[in-house]
Image (cartoon, helix red, strand yellow):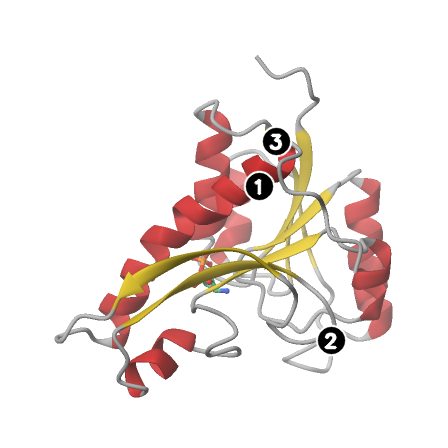
Amino acid sequence: MSLRPPLKLGILGSGRGSNFIAISDTIHAGRLNASVEIVISDLADAPILQLAQQRGYKTWSCPKGNFKTKLEPEIEEQLAAQLKAANCELIVLAGYMRVVKTPLLAAFPGRIINIHPSLLPAFPGLNAWEQALTACIAQTGCTVHFVNEVVDGGSIIAQTKVPILPDDTAETLHARIQVEEHKLLPAVIRQISEGKIVLDRH
Ligand code: GRF
């Protein structure tokens, strides 16, 4: 049994929430000493929020801003305040589709991680699995990395390779990448919770 208290997580997502479910399931299975303190979305109707509510987690959705790719600074301040009020120690971007800016980075320096569906630094940005298919390469994968001001540009923590098969479509490739994401992200959070990965300060 772990002597450390559970690592308090704040989870941000904009979509289906399958990575959030993987984290939650791993905690419930007793394989991750962490607790989900709050789940936040920038989209009020995102499935991740409904899933979180069904599981009894505290949720919050951002006020609707004027941009699709980022939050206005005052909205991101509110988001950071929600995470602080929930005493979050590690912020996990699990399919969060906005660029993270100074208010959140400054509130949690070196304490924000992201899962990205490619072997970074290859294919940052949107639809990375489609970028990999178009590039006609033999393999792609997924990456967990620290978040800084560069989109998908923070230091890499861990990666898993996924082969690209001759008959892959964008859908089949993304589905196989997600199978690996669901193992990699909880595994990295576990290593952080056990002190085996030291949180970045940059
Ligand atoms: C994942 O492929 C993740 O790598 C990317 O967005 C997707 C989120 O999927 N950043 P889900 O919402 O966790 O199912």
Ligand 1 neighbours mark 1 (CB distance < 8 Å): no
Q: CA distance from mark 2 to mark 1?
A: 30 Å
Q: Residue at x 63, y 33 (%)?
A: 193
Would you identify the image quadrant in which residue 97 lies? bottom right
Q: Can the viewer see residue 22 in this picture?
A: yes
> Is residue 155 placed above or below 180 in the rendered structure?
below
Identify residue for label 3.
34
- Answer with mark 2 or mark 3, whichever residue precedes in sequence: 3
- Circle 2: residue type: Gly
Q: Residue furthest left?
A: 167
The quadrant of the picture occupied by the N terminus is top right
Question: On the rendered structure, is 172 left or right of 37?
Answer: left
> Is residue 122 placed above or below 198 in the rendered structure?
below
Residue 7 x %, y %: 67, 32
Identify residue for label 2.
65
- Circle 3: residue type: Ala
Q: Residues within 10 Å of mark 2 (few under 14, many from 20)?
A: few
Asked if labels 1 and 3 touch by Cβ distance under 8 angstroms, the answer is yes
Identify residue for label 1.
189
Element carrying mark 2 = loop
Residue 118 x %, y %: 43, 69
Residue 36 x %, y %: 62, 37
